[in-house]
Image: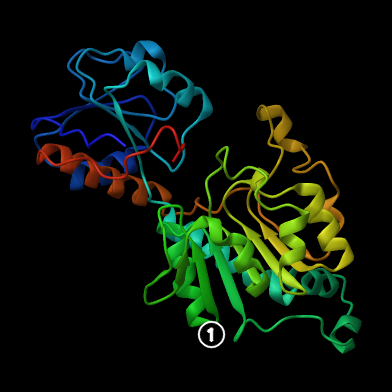
Amino acid sequence: MTTNVHILISTHAHFIFDRSDEADRVLKEQLDPTIHLTQGEVVPPETEILVGGRPSREQLASPKLKALIIPWAGLPDETKAILPEFPHISVHNLHHNAAPVAETAVTLLLAAAKLTIRYDRSLRRHDWRIRYEPSPTLTLEGRTALILGYGAIGQRVARACRALGMDVLATRRSETSITTDDYAEIHPSSALPDLLPRTHALIICLPLTAETEGLISKTELNALQPHAILVNVGRGPIVDEQALYDALVDGTLHAAGLDVWFNYPPDEAARAYTPATNVPLHELDNIVMSPHRAGLTRDTDRLRMTHLAALLNHAAQGKPLPNRLDLERGY
């Protein structure tokens, strides 16, 4: 990876994405006064930092541009495709969604362990019979969670799992040997085959890359402890959807909780009806489904602007911008 780019003091930052009046107020309250902000489709020639997720070639070609801040986590495919034409521009993410996504991951884990949706549906029909059946729900205390992707989200999930009395394993691509912190035993990604047989709850917090697509297939699911739980807040195609469906049907998995999917509405009209998967996961009682909203809360705009102000303030102080993306890895 190349070294971080130092941005000149008295920075000009230009926005190509809209923000509400309230978000603008939060940003300006925390922003260094030497930073000059503009907004619009046309990028002024003095712009040094561009803020937006899907800039055009023309916008990236601004003569003084040194950095692109994508105001969320991830790298859109169309942006990734044109960035190699601008090797002098560093690319940075915001991690403002780490806390709400981690909270959703834990919510999905607990709801899956306790089959909350199944019981909720029964009582909504005023049917109490399910209460008197032998309980298939799981206790998480004393079991082992494996977190794939030990970044800002994964580390928060680890803390919550430890608070529930779970043992926690984790994988991180940058690790070359086993390390530990206060919450997890951290392994290289290559150790996955050895970790799966120890795992009762597999929690995916990975980005989608060429290396992670299809990472969890039938082989990996069969290697888990009996009646394991799978939670995915990374990206849908990291898991083979047919293998996931089969494992939920045949009891290999106790349950799953998903916030990320395989199909998304291609336009606004399709939002009223677009199946999220190509297999009938929605027919199963042992899955909790969330429409990729883990990072969206009432606090999202405030958190986004707070984190953005922190990045821009680094620039105003002549410091390297944090959260730099590695374009080859895609995160």
Does residue 98 appear left or right of residue 259 in this picture? left
Total marks placed: 1
Q: In which quarter of the image is the N terminus?
A: top left
Above or below, 148 against 2 in this view is below
Give residue 268's quadrant in the image.
top right
Q: Please, what secondary structure does the residue beneath circle 1 have?
A: loop
Residue at point 75%, 67% (across, down) = 255
Which is more toward the observer, 143 or 121? 143
Give residue 49's quadrant in the image.
top left
Q: What is the x, y in percent for residue 30?
A: 19, 47
Q: What is the x, y in percent for residue 293?
A: 57, 50
Residue at point 88%, 81% (across, down) = 130
Residue at point 46%, 72% (across, down) = 185
Above or below, 57 against 178 in this view is above
Give residue 14's quadrant in the image.
top left
Which is more toward the observer, 300 or 211? 211
Residue at point 55%, 54% (across, down) = 294
Disc 1: which residue: 165
Task: Classify mark 1: residues with Cα within 10 Å, few (<14), some (14-19) or many (20+).
Answer: some
Which is more toward the observer, 211 or 298? 211
Q: What is the x, y in percent for residue 168?
A: 52, 74
Above or below, 178 against 54 in this view is below
Above or below, 156 against 74 in this view is below
Does residue 5 appear left or right of residue 290 in this picture? left
Q: Quadrant of the C terminus?
A: top left
Q: What is the x, y in percent for residue 287?
A: 76, 62
- The amino acid type, in three-letter code, at marker 1 is Gly
